[in-house]
Image (tube, helix red, strand yellow):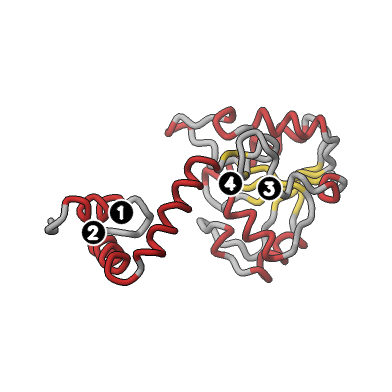
Amino acid sequence: MSSSTLLDELIRALQVQPGVGPASASRIAYYLLDRKRKEGLGLAKALTDAMDKISYCPKCRNYTDNEGEECKLCSSAQRATQRTICVVEHPNDIEAIENSSSFKGSYFVLHGHISPLDGIGPEAIGLDLLKGRIEKEHIQEVILALGQTVEGDVTASYIAAMAKKMSVKVTRIATGVPLGGSLNTVDGNTLAMSFNYRHDV
């Protein structure tokens, strides 16, 4: 406990971040107060704006600036002509793929994976919306860029079965993506190779 109730509240609030415990949160709080008050206020405003305004894109479920508004990637007419959807687990997977310059089609974000033990079924990760997009946009290929985990495999199998019923080609990236790993930890060259050597499911 510090000499200030507000400081204690700030330290507790900073611990919401992954990997930030009491010691790290305390160090960050004192640093902001001692040397970066102006930047701290900017951080507070950016956090408030992000929490209040960032929403899911109604088309791909990636993040977008305003509710009901398509994200920048979905607004691209050139991407829509590719007739290809890359399915990922998290929005930061898209950033990793875009940085690798290995894919120019459209995306769909699950925000997780099927996990019956946790009560997460197909509806919870938006697969009804994905099915609708595949039909409406006459998608020719669904690329599964999911983590190499048990849950990722179950989710990939479910999506593959759904897409095949609609006579859509399904592929999955493979080369260089480690078992149990996530896409945002893979370097761009390896990820690009994963796309180039994807295989049928």
**In the rendered structure, are the residues bearing label 4 and label 2 in contact, judged by CB atoms less than 8 Å apart?**
no
- Estimate the spatial distance between the alpha carbons at disc 2 and disc 3, rounded to whole Å: 38 Å
**Earlier residue among tags 1 and 2:** 1
- Left of 190 or right of it: where is 167? right
- Residue type at mark 3 is Leu
x then y, percent, for residue 176: 63, 65
x then y, percent, for residue 132: 74, 29
x then y, percent, for residue 165: 78, 30
Residue denoted by label 2: 22
Which label was assigned to residue 15?
1
Secondary element at image label 4? loop
Q: Work out whether residue 148 or residue 130 is closer to the camera in this orientation and state it.
A: 130
Residue denoted by label 4: 89
Q: Residue at x 52, y 58 (%)?
A: 181
Graded by Cα atoms within 10 Å as few (under 14), some (14 to 19) or many (20 or more), the crowding at tag 1 reads some
Decide: is 34 above or below 108.
below
- Estimate the spatial distance between the alpha carbons at disc 3 and disc 4, rounded to whole Å: 9 Å
Decide: is 193 above or below 14.
below
**In the rendered structure, are the residues bearing label 1 and label 4 in contact, judged by CB atoms less than 8 Å apart?**
no
Q: Which residue is drawn at 48% across and 53% down?
A: 46
Q: Based on the displayed image, in which of its 4 quarters is residue 70 positioned?
A: top right
**In the rendered structure, are the residues bearing label 1 and label 2 in contact, judged by CB atoms less than 8 Å apart?**
yes
Secondary element at image label 3? strand
- Left of 124 or right of it: where is 33? left
- Estimate the spatial distance between the alpha carbons at disc 1 and disc 4, rounded to whole Å: 25 Å
Graded by Cα atoms within 10 Å as few (under 14), some (14 to 19) or many (20 or more), the crowding at tag 4 reads many
Graded by Cα atoms within 10 Å as few (under 14), some (14 to 19) or many (20 or more), the crowding at tag 2 reads few
Residue denoted by label 3: 144
Decide: is 150 above or below 67.
below
